[in-house]
Image: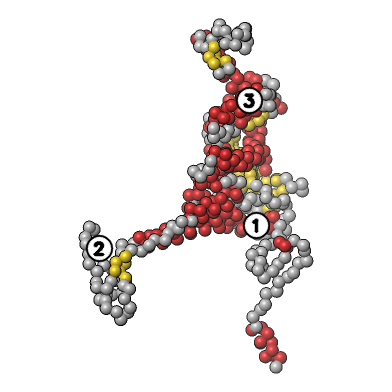
Amino acid sequence: MFERMKTLFHSAKPRTVIRQVQARFDAAQTTADNARHWAAADHLSADQEARPEVRRVLRMRSRYEIANNSYARGLVQMLANDTMGTGPRLQMQSGDEDFNDEVENEFARWAEDVKLSSKLRTMRMARCQDGETFAVMVTNPKIKHPVKMDVTVIEADRVAGELAWFADDASVDGVTFDAWGNPVSYRVLTYHPGDARYLPGDEAVVVPADYMIHVFRQDRPGLHRGVPELAASLPLFAQLRRYNLAALSAAEAAADFAAVLYTDAPPDGESEDIASLDAIPLERNMMLTVPAGWKMGQLDSKQPTANHAEFVKVILSEIARCVCSTYGTVAGDFSGFNYASGRLDNQIYHKAILVDRSLWETEALNRIFAAWFREYVLVASGHDADDARHTWFWDGFPHVDPTKEAAAQEKRLANSTTTLAAECAKDGRDYLSVLRQRAKEIRLMRLLGIPLPVNGMNMSQDQEPENGSEPKEEHDDE
C-alpha cells in the first residue's frame, strides 16, 4: 500500500508554487499572470551576470546581426562616424605658443601616420557590437616619425582568463586588479580563439595596464567587462527581419499565381470536371476560354499590410533607445518630421555623443597623448614634460538652418553671453587659429585694396559710414 501511494505521488503532476513577497510595490508581487515574465530575473552580481560564456554568446549574436541587418550595420557605423568624425584634434595650453604649435603639428603628423582616426572609429564600432574594446600601445619601428609608438587594436575575445578556475579574487576574465580596484595587467591570447592557429592551452602575453587601453560602459557598479550595447535590442532586430521576410514571402506567393479558376457551383453541380491544383501555362496577350461553370480570378495580395511601415517605425524607435538615439537618426528618414521635431531629434542624439566623447578623452585619448608626449620630449624636444596641458577639439554638428544659427551666434557674441572660443569649439575649431587666419586675410585685403566688411557691409578704409559718424582710425596692430 505504501509503495502504491509512493508511485502515485511521484507520477502526479507537480504544482507550481508561487512564492509571495510582502511589499507595497506592485512590481514586487509575483502572481500567476506575471510569473513567466519575471522567471529569468536573478540576483547575480555584475560580473557573474556578465560571465565569460554569456558575453561570448552576446558577442557572437551581435556580430551576426550587424553583418546581416542593414539597420544594425548603419547604426554602428553612424555611432563611429558621429563620435569620432575625422578624428580629435589636439590643442596645447602651455604658455609658449611656439611650443604649442610645434607639439600640435607633430602630434597631428604622428596621428596621420599611425591612422589614429581610423583606429578610433574601429574601436567605437567594436565597443558597440562587443561591449568593450582594447588597444595596446606598442613600439613600431616602421613609423615615419621620431616617436615610434603605435596603437594596436585587439578584439575582446583575445583578453581571457586561465582555462582552469581557481580561487583568485583579484582577476576577472583576464583582467587583474590590485587591492584598490585598479587594473594591473591584462592577459592577451596570442591568437584569437576562433583562429585556425589557436590551440587551447597556448601561452598568453601579460600586458601591463599602463600600456593597455580598455574602454567600455560600466552599466553596474562592480562590472569589469563590457556587454554589447545592442544586447537589449538583438531580439528586436530578429523580429524585424522575420517580419519583413514573412511579408515578402507572402507577397511572392500571391504574385506567383497569375490566375485562379473557381466555381460557385456545388460539388454535384453542372460544371466540367478539372483536376484539382492543376497548373495551366498561359501566354501573353492571348484570349483564353475557361471550362463551363468555372470563373477566372486573381489572388488578392494582403502583404505588405497597411500598417507595415508603422510596425517597422515602432521597432526601430525602440531599437534606437539602446544607444540614446531616435527613429530619425537610426532610420535616416526625417520625411515625417517638421523643422522643430527634426532638430529636437538631433539634439537628443548629439547630447549623447558629447557625453560619449568625454569618456573617450578620459579612457583613451589622454592616455595615448601622455605616452606619446613622454617619448616626444625624449627624442625630439628639449621642453619639460610638465608643459603637457591640453584639450581636444572634435568635429562640430552642422546646424539644420545655418542662417538662423549664425544670427543667434551673432546675438550671443554681441550681448557677451558667449565667447569666440566657445562658439568655435562648437564647430570643432580652435579660436586662436581662426583669429590668426583672419588677421592674415585682413592684412592681405588691405594690401590689395579690397574693402573690409563692416557690420555686414563692404567699406573701404577711407569710406565714411552712412550714419554720419567719423570712421575709426585704423592701426597696423589690429
Near mark 1 (Cα within 10 A), the count class, few <14, some 14-19 or many ≥20, is: some
In the structure shown, which secondary structural element does the residue marked by tag 3 occupy? helix
Residue underneath mark 2 = 282
Q: Nearer the viewer, mark 3 or mark 1?
A: 3
Location of mark 3 (residue): 411
Q: Amino acid at mark 1?
A: Arg
Q: Amino acid at mark 3?
A: Lys
Q: Is residue 115 left or right of residue 17?
A: left
Q: Quadrant of the N terminus?
A: bottom right
> Secondary structure under badge 1?
loop
Separation of marks 2 and 3 at Cα, in angstroms: 73 Å
Marks 3 & 1, CB-CB < 8 Å contact: no
Q: Nearer the viewer, mark 2 or mark 3?
A: 3
In the drawing, does residue 185 fall left or right of residue 459? right
Between the residue at mark 1 and the residue at mark 2, the CA separation in whole angstroms equals 62 Å
What type is the residue that disc 2 sits on? Leu
Please state the horizontal and vertical placement of residue 473, each as a whole percent of the image: 62, 7
Residue at far bottom of view? 1
Q: Give how far apart the Cα atoms at labels 3 and 1 are.
A: 54 Å
Which secondary structure, mark 2? Answer: loop
Residue under label 1: 51
Instruction: Identify the mark nearer the N-term, 2 or 3.
Output: 2
Q: Quadrant of residue 420?
A: top right
- 239 or 291: nearer the eye? 291
Q: Residue 270 at what x, y percent from top left?
A: 27, 78
1 or 2: tag closer to the N-terminus: 1
Foreground label between 1 and 2: 2
